[in-house]
Image (tube, rainbow, N blue to C red):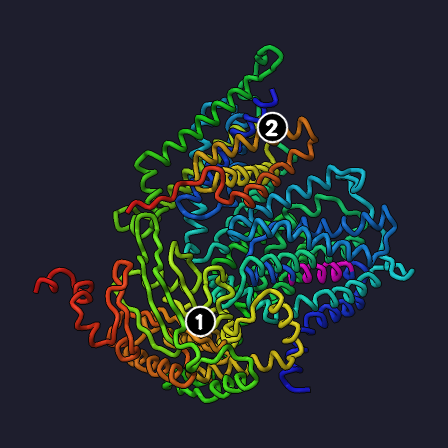
Amino acid sequence: MSNGRLRAITGVLAPSAVLLAVSVFGLLFDTYWQYVFAISISAAVIGSALAMLVGYARCITIATGAMLAIGAYGATIPIVHAGMPFLAAIIVAIILGACAGLVLAVPGVRFRSHNLAMITLVFQAVVIIVLRESKTLTGGAEGMHVPPPVILGFSFARDADFLLLCGAIYALAVLPMAVLLAGAFGKNLRALAFNENAARAFGIDVSQHLIAAFIFSSGLIAFAGAVSAPRFRIIDPDSYGIFTSIFTLAYPIIGGMGSIWGGLAGGGILRVVPELLRPLADYIELIFCALVVATLTFFPDGLASALWRRRRTRHRRIKPDTSLKPASVELAPIAELFAATEALGLAAAGRDGAEPILLTVEGVSKSYGALRAVDDVSLVVSAGALHGLMGPNGAGKTTLFNIVSGFVAADTGKVQMSGALLHDIPLEARIRLGMTRTFQHAAVFERLSCLDNVIIGLGRNSIAQGILRSFGQAYANAGSRSERRAAQAALVAVGLGTRVEDVAGALPLGDQRRLEIARAIVSRPRLMLLDEPVSGVSVEEARRLRELLLAINGQLGIAMVVIEHNIGFLSSLCRRISVMSQGRILAEGDAASIIADPRVRHAYFGEQEAAA
Amino acid sequence: MIVVGGLKFGAIYSLAALGIVVIYKATRIVNFAHGAFVLAGAYATYGIVEALDVGYWPAYLLVPIATGLLAAAVEFGMLRPIRQADMFALITSTIFIGIGLSEVYRLVQNTEMLGVRNPLPGPPIFLGDVIITKEQVWVLVGAIISALIGVVVFGYAPIGRGLRAIAANARGAALCGYSSDGMNAMAWFLGGALAGLAGIFAAPSKGISPELAISMITAGFVAAVIGGIDSLRGALFGGLVLGLAETVAAAYVSSAMKNAVSFLLLFVVLLWRPEGLFPEAKIRDV
């Protein structure tokens, strides 16, 4: 087994192994402690489910108590009233939880910060009231007796047996969660949580991902509710109330938002603190609240990850700082890779000769109220061209980019790429047509490594692909290895070959620009839209970026449309330049003719220049 | 009779919703601690009316000031340090601040439920077959008048202009001489004061317990979303609609239905009209 595969497999198996180990360890203690260990690993599983929803997707949910209740009652009612076997009842609970997650997510994800919090809050309140009122099924407020789980005739009534059962089935249940969080799906969630626009530009459908996250996480929480219910002997609606929801929300926040371990540790530890600190029992909720607010204020990534990172950065400081060395740019590997895919016939239609015209923009207009941001603009970009787009602030350059890349719908006009009309093609699908872009404000996924940033740039990010790829990555299959190779080649191509595993947010601005370029070329686009690729970087860095772009254009044949204010930069990069002003194309031609054009001078320097 | 009872609760919801909307409009924070502010208002009412036994009038004056100061203190002490953080951190903080305040109440006053006397006892009014209590009329009228005062202050007074300026463009407003720190605190004060008023009106009929915080935050949000979370008039209307819908559902369907109604309303509004029934006009004057 290769090293990479071993690491991938141990990585996703580790949470299950820890849960199992803790449950076995618990057997050494008396029955009270076995009970404590059982609720601790239940809470760890809840924490791992919330790591997905709260930690990765940064959704606020206050419905965890309701989900637990749905699981607990959803499994117990069929067991008690219909004599259903325990394992079948647990599956019913998972399905009910997943459905409840869907019901919450569909209206909630549109404005995920507050709407979601609100709708989960109301849902929580309603579920508890309905359980309290449906007395014939649930026993109402007095509660309902839960028989011990019976599997194949064996009754898990003793604390030790129950603890082992929990360890075993939680270890199984947490495995898919670990796979999804460690893999492409989890990375896509983290990407969209911090930079929704960039995520969409690379094919991540935000709503679908959030709905999926809600379904997975709710299913697992309901499962934990169903499995843990027998241990409480009697379940009543109020033990799944809003306080439960809110304190479970604290698990991933205090434990740490960036990995499954934060949720596991947060849940496993916080849930048993009240059991251990009996004298403080009355103040425990208040202490939790203070702890959460303090964590959000001082350690936004979570207490556990703050401690963890402090240890790691101390290690890292020993390494020499390579950031000051001039980046070495090496395009050969990615060019080879592209050539190889072409030989296999996987590349998009040929770029030489067959279609000289790549992009046509015809009479496109866009108004915001009375402001015509883009006014009857037409533009033609041929395959392999380097086309500059300049103009004063507010000229409509970025709006035009947003129309072409699909962020904004034009009021009128046509945009075609290789003869295909783009209007009905959603933003998320445009990357497959061979169009990628960078953003005016460097929009890297700052919490992800450079490598993961570029892998997202491959654009295989539909919800089904994300889930399938996660399972592939869990055993480092051929597909995931070739993705890593392509991403590494792209990083080498832009001179970030030494920073593959570094977190993108830690890079200096110039390197973030390079990372954006790597992410944009790795999918082998035919057209790249670059929005102010050198804004904010030094003159020296701008020169090097220009050389990089020229090399990419020359060796990989990717056409570029480049927005830039810096006319020196633009004229040394682009053979053809269009000048926009007040929403219109003012002039188009080579650099010399643009600089000489009186209308351009007028737009830039105003009336005096025109009069002179 | 049902209608008047529903409108009474509706008017209280309107007040709660209005406070949420005022804070949201000025600072873009959805305040999940709002229910706790209402609870604080109700508890302060209990202190003045029952513990000090000085009648209701001082409460109407002092309680809004007290809860307003509480809200401004929360903003100043706890939210200001993380103002630069994302919405997730801000909203989550308000959730835990709210629960923390409720917990403080529970620790201070460890009883099931406190009652406050009826502000306007006396024989009910008969209109044909319909029986209306004076308390219902008083709460309905009082809450609506308070809400209207809130709308007028935010919509027309000079303070309101500053608040709206901050909301529209914080940096621009700062350049024009509005202190954004001061205005944020002011918005929270105003929102907190409205929550306090909701607390005064809610205390006699709903009783005082941590449950009050949760039921008021839930109802306040639903009302605010129905009206379009950005609209003061919408919040006023949304509260009344919710109050009516709940009471009608309880009377004609079942009491469990009463609470499901709020979720159904929220669900339907978010799915079909996420901008609410009274979206603020977003016309740009150029």
According to the image, label 1 marks what residue?
A418
According to the image, label 2 marks what residue?
B115
Residue A338 in picture, x, y percent from top left = 50, 84
Q: Is residue A250 left or right of residue B145?
A: right
Residue A545 in the image: above or below residue A232: below
What type of secondary structure mainly makes up the magenta span? helix
Residue A528 in picture, x, y percent from top left = 41, 73
Which of B2/A597 is in front? A597
* Residue A43 part of the magenta segment: yes
Which of B57/A600 is in front? A600
Q: Are the two marked residues, 2 and 1, in contact with CB atoms closer than 8 angstroms?
A: no
Which amino acid type corresponds to the residue marked 1 in the rendered image?
Answer: Ser
Which of A522/A192 is in front? A522
Which of A265/B267 is in front? B267
> The N terminus of chain B lies in which quarter of the figure?
top right
Q: Which residues are magenta?
A: A35-48
Residue A550 in the image: above or below residue A292: below
Residue at disc 2, secondary structure: loop
